[in-house]
């Protein structure tokens, strides 16, 4: 892909810029991507990423034997993509891939309290630990309808002339194993019911 009409620039350390994209064809140049469809880039020092921030329990997914948490990235990734997150709870650890920002910790004891924190890692080093969150599992086994799957977007779809293959990520089961997925297809511009 060729980028036209862009002046070279350099970033000052810790300066952030927001990138937007437009497309050009033989007829002309289209509009810039809308707010939220761009990407923010921060030029920061090479090294360990900043600690994850805003670690929080996803309370609606709590069961007798599991807790679910989500977090946000710190401002700087150390100029190296986050490759993984290590989640510590009491004396245990779990690891998830760097593109995920949530974890469901299973196999826990009902009515017990757990202290949870997260460390981000890149190819250079590990971050400091995030804030610590204290959460307690339910005393009685409960359950709710599962949440909507995530990561269902154009980046995860494969189209052919007469088919569409979709992939998604399960973020929780509401306290009961998933038994089926229902895919609803509606024409563009209409709302699924």
Image (cartoon, rainbow, N blue to C red):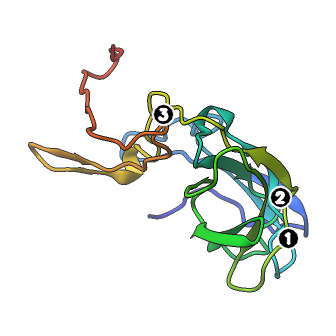
In the image, which disc is placed on residue 44? 1
Q: Residue furthest bottom?
A: 124
Looking at the picture, tell me which residue is in the foreground, 60 or 139: 139
Q: Taking 135 as reference, is 138 left or right? A: left
- Identify whether 19 is placed above or below 88: above
Dots 2, 1 in contact, CB < 8 A? yes
| Distance between mark 2 and mark 3 Cα atoms | 28 Å
Q: Quadrant of residue 47?
A: bottom right
In the image, which disc is placed on residue 75? 2
Disc 1 element:
loop
Q: Which residue is mark 3?
A: 147
Q: Residues within 10 Å of mark 1 (few under 14, many from 20)?
A: some
Q: Residue at x 58, y 58 (%)?
A: 100
Query: Which mark sits nearer the N-terminus, 2 or 1?
Result: 1
Q: Residue at x 75, y 75 (%)?
A: 79
Q: Quadrant of residue 137?
A: top right
């Amino acid at each position: 892909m060729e980028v036209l009409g862009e002046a070279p620039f350099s970033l000052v350390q810790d300066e952030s810029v927001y990138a937007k994209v437009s497309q050009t064809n033989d007829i002309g140049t289209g509009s810039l991507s809308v707010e939220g469809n761009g990407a923010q880039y921060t030029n920061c020092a090479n090294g360990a990423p900043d600690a994850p921030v805003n670690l929080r329990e996803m309370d609606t997914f709590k069961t007798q034997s599991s807790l679910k948490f989500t977090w946000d990235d710190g401002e700087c990734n150390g100029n190296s993509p986050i490759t993984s997150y290590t989640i510590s709870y009491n004396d245990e650890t779990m690891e998830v891939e760097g593109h995920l920002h949530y974890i469901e910790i299973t196999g826990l004891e009902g009515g017990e309290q757990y202290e949870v924190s997260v460390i981000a890692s890149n190819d250079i080093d590990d971050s400091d630990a995030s804030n610590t969150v204290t959460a307690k599992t339910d005393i009685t086994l409960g359950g709710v309808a599962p949440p909507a799957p995530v990561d269902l977007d154009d980046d995860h779809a494969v189209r052919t002339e007469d088919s569409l293959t979709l992939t998604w990520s399960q973020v929780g089961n509401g306290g009961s194993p998933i038994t089926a997925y229902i895919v609803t297809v509606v024409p563009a511009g209409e709302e699924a019911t």
